Image (cartoon, helix red, strand yellow):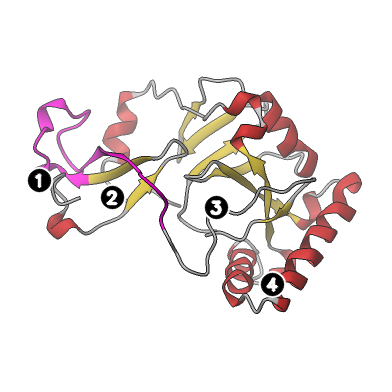
């Protein structure tokens, strides 16, 4: 981080589903500004590949994928992994504000799995270990999947309480509150773990086709773009 130009080596970074470590560096501190897509603001920088795993103690960011069906996502529910979305026309897209970029690959199996639990457009997250979880509003759960979702909730809660896993109880509750329009976890969006990238489409990792240079100018005004 320090070598890349981050002051004192501090700052945020992102790890992609392929283990690529990315950060943003102020243009004034970026040594290779002549090679950057923009010359002002925050420059996207590739730091290298992650070796091993990051240990967050009681928060398991690399759990066993669900063997049958789904599970409640117990890892970090905020600012973690790559944020994608399934569109109205069943495309996997990366979007920010008015910008929308489609993955270059066909993710029909992944999108079909998403549609089983949430038939409406919405977000989908891919972590650095390749896990996939989605936001599922209670009212969006299809009739055919309601029993399965309820069973996943019951199993997660019972296991967490039995093991005194307060971390996952707090994190899931905060996700429900944050995605609720009334700050009531009862009507928040459930964080549903639907599997691993290797389970879908031959393990293809989503890659957006960024074909609008203006995007780099706009997004370069911010160090972080989570909204």
Q: Secondary structure at mark 3?
A: loop
The image position of residue 138, as x and y in percent, is 78, 57
At 78% from the left edge and 49% from the top edge, which residue is drawn? 140
The image position of residue 225, as x and y in percent, is 38, 48
- Which residue corresponds to mark 2? 223
Q: CA distance from mark 2 to mark 1?
A: 13 Å
- Which residue corresponds to mark 1? 29
Q: Secondary structure at mark 4?
A: helix
Q: CA distance from mark 2 to mark 4?
A: 35 Å
Foreground: disc 2 or disc 3: 3
Magenta stretch, residue numbers: 25-54
As drawn, the label of residue 160 is 4
Q: Tag 1 or tag 2, which sits nearer the N-term? A: 1
Q: Secondary structure at mark 1?
A: helix
Foreground: disc 2 or disc 1: 1
- Which residue corresponds to mark 3? 62
The image position of residue 167, as x and y in percent, is 57, 73
* Residue 11 position by quadrant: bottom left
Relative horizontal placement of residue 101, taking residue 182 as reference (left or right): left
Label 2 neighbourhood size at 10 Å, few (<14), some (14-19), many (20+)?
some
Q: Tag 3 or tag 2, which sits nearer the N-term? A: 3
Q: Tag 4 or tag 2, which sits nearer the N-term? A: 4
Q: Is residue 46 magenta?
A: yes
Foreground: disc 2 or disc 4: 4
Label 3 neighbourhood size at 10 Å, few (<14), some (14-19), many (20+)?
some
Q: CA distance from mark 1 to mark 3?
A: 34 Å
- Looking at the image, the residue that sits furthest to the front is 52
As drawn, the label of residue 159 is none
* Residue 16 position by quadrant: top left
Q: Is residue 25 above or below residue 159?
A: above
Label 4 neighbourhood size at 10 Å, few (<14), some (14-19), many (20+)?
some
């Amino acid at each position: 981080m320090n070598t890349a130009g981050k002051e004192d080596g501090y700052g945020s970074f992102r790890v992609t589903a392929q283990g690529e470590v990315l950060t943003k560096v102020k243009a004034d501190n970026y040594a290779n500004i002549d090679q950057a897509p923009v010359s002002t603001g925050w420059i996207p920088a590739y730091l290298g590949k992650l070796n091993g795993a990051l240990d967050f103690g009681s928060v398991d960011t690399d759990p066993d994928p669900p063997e049958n069906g789904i599970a409640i996502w117990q890892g970090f529910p905020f600012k973690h992994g790559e944020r994608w979305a399934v569109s109205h026309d069943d495309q996997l897209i990366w979007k920010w504000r008015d910008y929308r970029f489609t993955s270059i690959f066909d993710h029909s199996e992944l999108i079909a799995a998403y549609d089983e639990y949430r038939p409406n457009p919405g977000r989908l997250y891919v972590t650095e270990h390749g896990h996939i979880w989605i936001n599922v509003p209670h009212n969006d759960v299809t009739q055919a999947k309601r029993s399965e979702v309820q069973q996943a909730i019951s199993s997660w809660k019972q296991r967490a309480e039995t093991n005194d896993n307060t971390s996952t109880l707090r994190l899931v509750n905060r996700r429900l509150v944050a995605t609720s329009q009334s700050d009531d976890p009862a009507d928040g969006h459930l964080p549903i773990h639907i599997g691993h990238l290797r389970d879908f489409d031959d393990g293809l990792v989503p890659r957006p086709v960024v074909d609008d240079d203006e995007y780099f100018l706009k997004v370069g005004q911010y160090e972080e773009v989570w909204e």
